[in-house]
Image: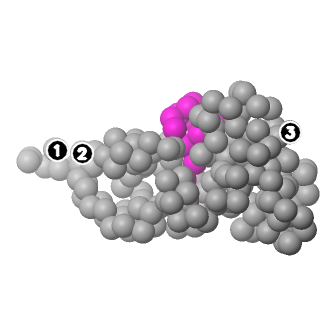
Amino acid sequence: MDGASMDRVRDVTLWVNGERVSRRVAVRTHLVDFLRVELELTGSHLGCEQGVCGACTVRVDGVAVRGCLMLAVQADGARVETIEGLSDSGAIADLQAAFHARNALQCGYCTPGMLVSAAELLAANPAPTRDEIRAHISGNYCRCTGYHAIVDAIETTAAARRGEGGAA
């Protein structure tokens, strides 16, 4: 490769869902594209590609980020958690069950981003108010369910985690 070509690709190493991953990527590859195409982790979706809809939300070093706004090279050395990793680990099983029980999902397109955002909220605030829940998920668009059922599911999960009633 000549010098100009070397500027267009970079080697990256990151930990995705606990596994070390090394790849050579184009410097303009967005993190969500890297996850979906290179690693075949298709749970995170591409929606608006402007960071507005939240469908591409993943965790990077414990913080929810928009995968369409972050480049894969920016995640070099980071720990990335996708909906697949959170789901497989069982970390959000109660939240997923509440979403199902409360009919807080229909087409499922926004659901992975909603779950990642909700998990982040509940980790930081085990007793959020309905207004706090709405504020936290306000960057995640849902075109199918409306937000009432989603807020119910998150509120139900928070209460169950605090030992206040059954899950879902």
Q: In the image, which is nearer the foreground, mark 1 or mark 3?
A: 3
* Tag 1–tag 2 contact (CB < 8 Å): yes
Q: Residues within 10 Å of mark 2 (few under 14, many from 20)?
A: few
Q: Quadrant of residue 164?
A: bottom right
Residue type for callout 2: Arg
> SS of the residue at dot 2?
loop
Residue bearing mark 1: 4
Residue drawn at 9 percent across, 47 percent down: 2
Q: Tell me how far mark 1 sits from mark 2, CA to CA.
A: 7 Å
Q: Which of the two discs, 3 and 2, labels the residue nearer the N terminus?
A: 2
Residue type for callout 3: His
Q: In the image, which is nearer the foreground, mark 1 or mark 2?
A: 2
Q: Residues within 10 Å of mark 1 (few under 14, many from 20)?
A: few
Residue type for callout 1: Ala
Span shown in magenta: 45-59
Assign the magenta stretch its main secondary structure. loop
Q: Quadrant of residue 145?
A: top right
Q: Is any atom of residue 126 visible in this view?
A: no
Residue bearing mark 3: 148
Q: In the image, which is nearer the foreground, mark 3 or mark 2?
A: 3
Residue bearing mark 2: 8
Nearer the observer, 30 or 150: 150
> SS of the residue at dot 1?
helix
Q: Is residue 41 magenta?
A: no
Residue drawn at 8 percent across, 48 percent down: 1
Q: Is residue 48 magenta?
A: yes
* Tag 3–tag 2 contact (CB < 8 Å): no
